[in-house]
Image (spheres, rainbow, N blue to C red):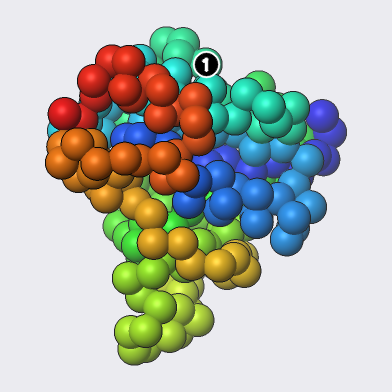
């Protein structure tokens, strides 16, 4: 896969929903990604989450019809990774000489200046930033917020390439899906049908 343009899309995905898939699809079409690798966070240290095996399986089913999308396997390599830098190193070992693009939401991108080993990981990827509905009408604009991130990193002599993903803002979030499940409301059209059935069969989030 020499010089392939590969996207990394990491997250808790609790659960994966149509907003996630729209972000990945928009990133693919905008920059011409040959492949997207979905990485399910096995041990989110900042919040409790549904067991990894459920979240991983929901992502697998959600992207099953896409030959150019794959999910990082639930192997020791990825199960033991704690930091984004470790994830990138593991993927670089499996896909040498590829050009890496990291797909993430604006709220996560804003934390990049605090990431562990940011001086190594930030220049190694092009950062594809998905706007979030939360910031749509707020000031300052997303362009200014992203510029601030780049400026903060530049004070450490860390320089990044980034661009904003052009996509319609869909007001679906994982927390909203979980709330609908707790309230016994329908989540049809919030998530892929296979994911909706999986959640219902196992009574997740209730």
**Residue extending farthest top:** 76
Above or below, 202 relative to 163:
above
Q: Secondary structure at mark 1?
A: loop
Q: Is residue 18 left or right of residue 164?
A: left
Q: Image quarter for residue 97?
A: top right
Quarter placement of the C terminus: top left
Q: Is residue 15 left or right of residue 189?
A: left
Q: In this view of the protein, which residue sits in the foreground, 73 or 175? A: 175
Return the x and y of residue 11 as percentages of the image width and height.
40, 40
Q: Which residue is mark 1?
A: 73
Q: Is residue 70 left or right of residue 199?
A: right
Residue under the image location 42 percent in, 11 percent down:
76
Return the x and y of residue 24 as percentages of the image width and height.
60, 48
Q: Is residue 120 left or right of residue 136?
A: right
Residue under the image location 31 percent in, 40 percent down:
186
**Residue extending farthest bottom:** 139
Residue under the image location 24 percent in, 41 percent down:
185
> Can residue 121 be spotted in the picture?
no
Above or below, 32 relative to 43:
below
User: Are there few (<14), some (14-19), or many (20+) residues within 10 Å of tag 1?
Assistant: some
């Amino acid at each position: 896969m020499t010089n392939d343009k590969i996207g990394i899309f990491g997250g808790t995905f609790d659960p994966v929903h149509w907003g996630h898939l729209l972000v990945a699809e928009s990133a693919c079409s905008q920059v011409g990604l040959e492949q997207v690798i979905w990485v399910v966070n096995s041990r989110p240290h900042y919040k409790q989450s549904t067991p990894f095996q459920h979240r991983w399986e929901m992502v697998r089913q959600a992207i099953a019809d896409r030959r150019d999308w794959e999910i990082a396997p639930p192997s020791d390599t990825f199960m033991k990774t704690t930091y984004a830098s470790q994830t990138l190193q593991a993927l670089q070992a499996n896909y040498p000489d590829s050009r890496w693009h990291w797909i993430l939401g604006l709220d996560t991108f804003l934390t990049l200046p605090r990431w562990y080993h940011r001086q190594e990981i930030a220049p190694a990827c092009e950062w594809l930033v998905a706007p979030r509905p939360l910031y749509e009408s707020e000031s300052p604009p997303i362009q200014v917020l992203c510029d601030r991130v780049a400026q903060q990193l530049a004070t450490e002599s860390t320089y990044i390439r980034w661009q904003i993903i052009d996509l319609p803002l869909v007001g679906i979030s994982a927390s909203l899906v979980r709330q609908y499940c707790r309230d016994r409301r329908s989540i049809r059209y919030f998530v892929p049908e296979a994911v909706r059935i999986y959640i219902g069969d196992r009574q997740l989030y209730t």
